[in-house]
Amino acid sequence: MRSSLQNSKCLLNIYNKLVIRKGQHLIANQTAIHHSSFITDHSPIDWNVVETEAAQLLSRYIQFDTSNPPGNEALAIEFLADTLRQRGFAPQIFRSAPNRANLVVRLNGQGDIDCAPCLLYAHADVVPADPIAWSMPPFEGYVKDDFVWGRGALDNKGLGIVFMQALTLLRQYASPPKRDIILLIAT
């Protein structure tokens, strides 16, 4: 059985290998993780596929203008929930106001009652962006030279996509963690 520390290292490794942050963009890293204590599917992770998928998801997610005020995150949250459903998860959506929504999804652990769940948190709303002040349109999710450009790429839409990718990889390649892992993407 893996320890909580091993579970944390696994998630941190996935996060570190998937994304390098720099400026107003997100770039994918070409390195891979190999740690036999948490990989149960012995086929190698194809990081090119993972990175390409993450960039595509982030690009699409950025295209939802979730500037706050007013927020309008509901359509973006529906997009993320649909993506998670396609991956076999059962996300829940909680509406807090018209056009405002929060997403919760759980990766079940081993059911150890002594272990509190691990919460991964990201927010879907972004600060308004003046397109004149941007070198790329802030809500197009433009991909250029391995960079995803747009409002929220670093704060905080990029993190939400990393967490979704990590949950997917943990589900596919890792034995069940000792504790549940809950992803909350909120307004």
Image (cartoon, rainbow, N blue to C red):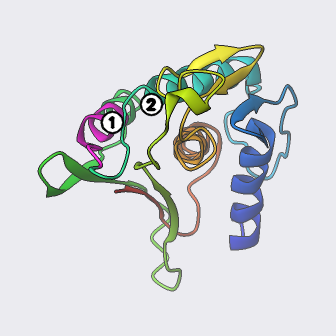
Residue type at tag 1: Ala
Residue 160: horizontal and vertical position, in percent?
52, 46
Which range is magenta?
71-80
Disc 2 to disc 1, how far (Cα)? 6 Å
Image quarter of the C terminus: bottom left
Q: Is residue 135 left or right of residue 103?
A: right
Q: Quick check: marks 2 and 1 in contact, CB under 8 Å? A: yes
Q: Residue furthest left?
A: 98
Q: How many marks?
A: 2
Q: Is residue 94 above or below residue 30?
A: below
Residue in the image at 61% along x and 29% along y:
134
- Residue 74 magenta-highlighted: yes
Q: Pick whichever, 183 or 19, lies toward us.
A: 19
Q: Residues within 10 Å of mark 1 (few under 14, many from 20)?
A: many
Residue type at tag 2: Tyr
Of label 2 and label 1, which has the lower sequence position?
A: 2
Q: Residues within 10 Å of mark 2 (few under 14, many from 20)?
A: many
Q: Pick whichever, 1 or 167, lies toward us.
A: 167
Q: Residue furthest top?
A: 144
Residue in the image at 54% along x and 43% along y:
171
Q: Pick whichever, 96 or 140, lies toward us.
A: 140
Q: Secondary structure at mark 2?
A: helix
Q: Which residue is mark 1?
A: 76
The image's mark for residue 61 is 2
The image's mark for residue 150 is none
Residue 110: horizontal and vertical position, in percent?
50, 65
- Residue 79 magenta-highlighted: yes
Residue in the image at 51% along x and 28% along y:
131
Q: Is residue 149 above or below residue 153?
A: above
